[in-house]
Amino acid sequence: MPTTQQPNGLSSKPRCIAIVVAAGRGSRVGGDTPKQYLPIGGEAIVRRTLRAFCQHPMIDSVLPVINMDDADLFQNAAEGLDTLPPVSGGDTRQASVRAGLEHLAALSPAPDYVLIHDAARAFASETLISSVVEALGDHAGAIPALRVVDTLKREDGNGLISETVDRDALWRAQTPQGFRFPEILAAHRTFASESLTDDSALAERAGLVVSLVEGEESNVKITTPEDIAAANETLVQGEARTGQGFDVHRFCDGDAVTLCGVTIPHSHGLEGHSDADVAMHALTDALLGALAEGDIGTHFPPSDAQWRGTDSEVFLKFAADRVSGRNGRIINVDVTIICETPKIGTYRAAMTERLAEIMAITNDRVSVKATTTEKLGFTGRGEGIAAQAIATIRLP
Ligand code: MG
């Protein structure tokens, strides 16, 4: 089945759902909190993991599988992320995956492809996810893996070497592991009573052809306190970057304006090629500026009729996805709307919430403010609305 991707990754076929397995309760890290809910770089491990899939253009939905005893932890960690409601896992990882697969089997339509991923791998890149999905065009299964580079020794049971193992054909398996959905569902059902270490092992047992795609050293499974420390280090390293954006739209005939995704009744509308959300445009340009990846016009040319009347959410989501696609994250954004009217105050909370939702970050990282210009200048004369924004991101 060919994978066709529209420009800017706005839609993709075939239908692919990612199961994120977060049902484990163990914490080798200490304390009572299961490790996937512990923070790295200021946010829960599982949040980072979910976001990578929620924002991926080839993934249609994300299904978390959790232990319902941790439902509150999960709700906090996943606040604002657009996942399916979590389903309850089983006693083992294999049983949890099976629960997820059975849930998807009951959906209409069921997915064509499924990716199965461990919540504790919070650094799978956009490219890695893409390469697994793309490989499913040719094979029933595909997993990312890394060649073994150390020389391997087999022990005789007494601490002595019995042989040196040929490492040439040996790989270390990672996740996300991708499969054509009906095949992996059948394999899980057939071998439900056996305990196998990963989903690929079930697929292999069922006789499915599983291909290897190049894994990533950075796609580590966070297991120990040392891993947590290393993950924090990774996220703190790299560099902070700041971008700014500025935009103006002129008033025109109309009865409402859209600002930060919120429609506000007004004596005029705003003129523009898209929905003229001047504030969201400024913010989008701030994010693209921090990435040094041009501006809205670079990616969505006004000369291109397909963007006429577009909901500006598309532009902002694109910019936010570019940040996570480069394995970065948004630290905070601050938007200032400049106009005499309409008055913004009562809409501010809704605006903050909407922007946070689109960028898949928490509300406390988003600021929306408004000011007048004391009736001076074009905004003071009520000719239009200006907006400026600043965004700080961290890139690895
Ligand atoms: Mg604009």
Image (tube, rainbow, N blue to C red):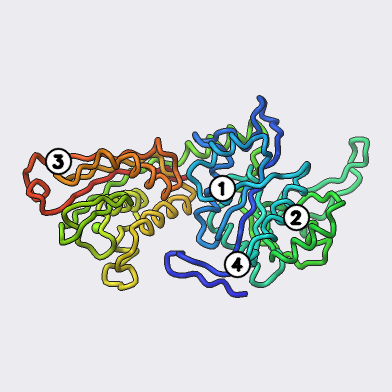
| Distance in Å between CA atoms under marks 2 and 3 | 59 Å
The amino acid on which the numbered mark 2 sits, given as a three-letter code, is: Asp
Q: List the residue tagged with mark 3.
A: 372
- The kind of residue on which mark 4 rests is Glu
Q: Distance between the residues labelled 3 and 1?
A: 40 Å
Quarter assignment of residue 3: bottom right
Q: Which sits earlier in the primary sequence, circle 3 or circle 1?
A: 1
Secondary structure at badge 4 equals: helix
Nearer to me, 355 or 326 = 355
Mark 1 is on which residue type?
A: Leu
Q: How far apart are marks 4 and 3 (CA)?
A: 51 Å
Can you identify the residue that label 4 sits on?
134
Q: How crowded is mark 2: few (under 14 residues within 10 Å), some or many (20 or more)?
A: many
Cα distance in 3D space between marks 4 and 1: 20 Å
Nearer to us: label 3 or label 1 = 3
| Circle 3: element type | loop
Locate residue 259, reporting x and y percent. 27, 50
- Identify which residue is drawn at 69% across, 41% down: 23
User: Where is residue 226, by image quadrant?
Assistant: top right
Q: Which mark is residue 199?
A: 2
Tag 2 or tag 4, which sits nearer the N-term?
4
Determine whether the residue tagged by mark 2 lies in a helix, strand or loop. Answer: helix
**Label 1's element?**
helix
**Where is mark 1, residue-wise?**
50
